[in-house]
Image: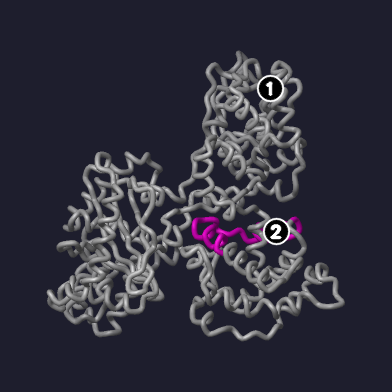
Amino acid sequence: MAELSLGDYARTLINDIQSQAEVEGGSIPETFTQWVLEQLEEAGFVANTTVTYHSEHGVMVYGFGVSEDRSVLDLYTTDFDLNPAIDKLTKSDVQQSYRRLLAFLRKAGRIRGNFDETNEVYQLCEGVEKAFAGASKVRLFLFSNRESTARGLPEPAEWQGVPVEHELWDLARLHRHQTSGSLGEPITVEFEPPLPCLFVPGTEANHSVTLTVVPGRLLAEWYDEYRTRLLELNVRAFLQTRGKVNRGIRQTLLNQPGCFLAYNNGITATASEAEFVEDTDGSPAAIRKLTGLQIVNGGQTTATLHHVFKRDRNELANVGVQMKLTLVRPSDLMEIVPLISAYSNTQNKVTLVDFSSNDKFHVDFERVSRSIWAPAVNGTGQETRWFYERARGQYAEEEAKHHTAAAKRKFRAIHPRAQKFAKSDLAKYVNSWNRLPHLVSRGAQKNFTEFRLRINDAPPVVDVIYCQRVIAMGILFKAVDAVAKEHEAGSHKALVTTYTMARLSKAVGQRIDLDRIWREQTVTEAVLEAASDLCPLVMAAVIQEGKHVTEWAKSSKCWDEVSDIHWEMPASLSAELLDRPVEFTVDTREEEAERLARLLEIEAEEWEALGEWARQTRGLELSEQQLATTIATKLATKGRITDAQVRQALEVYDRAIDVGFSPAAL
């Protein structure tokens, strides 16, 4: 959905839930619960969900879920308020909701005895008891359309020896989740009065050049509003005022502002569209408006102007900055911009990795990855972000814009330094996973070059799933790196790490569940044990007496030898592997369309009959019964059916046929 303010989002959410409840004939809290679970199931937070409400003294529950491996039991409760802007969700409200959920878990056996076997509450209690018997963890979920004022969640606890964690999805977190993955709009700026310019018609059909002088304060204000969005196509972000070039810019602005235009090289910018004021002969004389503005060279100048304007309280009076503006068709942007950057960039040393910042792949990866919230782990309730540093210095630049100590701490809590990674890191993670450790061993620059050639030959679909899986590779890489350290790989640890990860990837056929690693933000014990078992064997092949280790590791012959290592995969790892390798470049929209078409061929009455059959015969689990009824309702009311619901519903339908449901008998 389009990104709304929190207040607008709250009002929209209430209207949507009320309308959906009216159409489907359900209560508002239960409809809200179902809606939240659909969002979370699509994102992989929950699985096998059932919505069933029960309340009595000291007890309130809205449903439960069980993880795919049956190791985690989830209990759900809901707080829905028609006036969320007036009544905030207090710490007391949160604690009371969790107490009522835990009370249900304690009393499920007694409550079940008060209902008939065909009653949903009976089946709710029975399902929870069965799930708890095999669970290694319980998660208590509170869903609310109110914004929480609680500073934290209850500490993780235990019940009957099983860890109990708390998850809060309040209005603010739901809003973040709903807007996760959205991309920014093109930057549009207007000049009043119009900016005098010299227009130079291009000899090439795909671009033209305009020269002008922009007021320094205007550049500072642009940066204040758009920040690094303004520099998305720049080869690097603001490197702070530590470098001598940036210090020189600052000193000129403070001590000799009238000389700035003469001393500074100015900025190079691109735009996709421009509106001009025309001269009497019809040629452009002044710029009135620019659309799709990007500063591709001169980010140092722009950010330093902002720094002086905000930090030094300097009005930048009489400071002008020359701008070379290239109007480029959007379709030609990624071809021309790298050349502009390469030929005009002289202020700081720029590497090949820096120049590739302009590649569409990296721009897309940054924009998508920055919109994703990593799941909260360890029961802390604190969601975080992985910070992809597409251009050098971005992390420091983003941190620096938070002026107070408290604001900086909050930024670091959301963007831990341990979760910052650069383009060379990304290339290292992916090439290790793709069994190219000899390329990784050749160093960051050479490995990145090889990585770049491969993605140019076979561009991946850079969406939320792709970004999450690449980050999961990074989590796996870091876990293997810790294993190599434990095995005392010493100065050759980097080589041992990439080779161990590559050999592990080969052994499992790239069937490690990267989506699970993303959801849990860690690797499983089985993966760690396997890496620890494999690492000494890899070390023996890489670190050989009589061979120059660093040169040997760069050779494909080294990888051939490591590939041939005999290693028995532990049963614990084999048991958790996927059925097929993880896919990255396949667009599954066609497959999803085919599944939806098949589901739509089954009438709503048949789905309703399936749900009733399952309830009477108990041939399916309660969550599967409810899913069939939900599909029937959505078909009858023309409601939206999510991709996850389509997949699960067809699996339920096929299973029902296998165990005795007969559509022909209708």
Mark 1 closeness class: few <14, some 14–19, many ≥20 residues within 10 Å: many
- Name which quarter of the figure residue 601 lies in: bottom left
Depth check, front residue: 317 or 324: 317
The answer to which of marks 2 and 1 sits earlier in the sequence is 1
Of helix, strand and loop, which one carries label 2?
Answer: helix
Above or below for 283 versus 591: above
Circle 2 or circle 1, nearest the eye: 1
The CA span between labels 2 and 1 is 42 Å
Q: Secondary structure of the magenta portion, mostly? A: helix
Of the 4 image quadrants, the one containing the C terminus is: bottom left
Q: Is residue 139 magenta?
A: no
The amino acid pointed to by label 2 is Leu
Q: Which residue is mark 2?
A: 453
Depth check, front residue: 65 or 430: 65
Q: Position of residue 71 (x, y in %)?
A: 39, 74
Of helix, strand and loop, which one carries label 1?
Answer: helix
Mark seen at residue 253: 1
Q: Give the residue at x 38% y 48%.
A: 151
- Name which quarter of the figure residue 288 lies in: top right
Q: Is residue 285 visible?
A: no
Q: Position of residue 632 (x, y in %)?
A: 23, 66
Q: For the magenta stretch, what is the residue range?
A: 445-472
Q: Is residue 4 visible?
A: yes
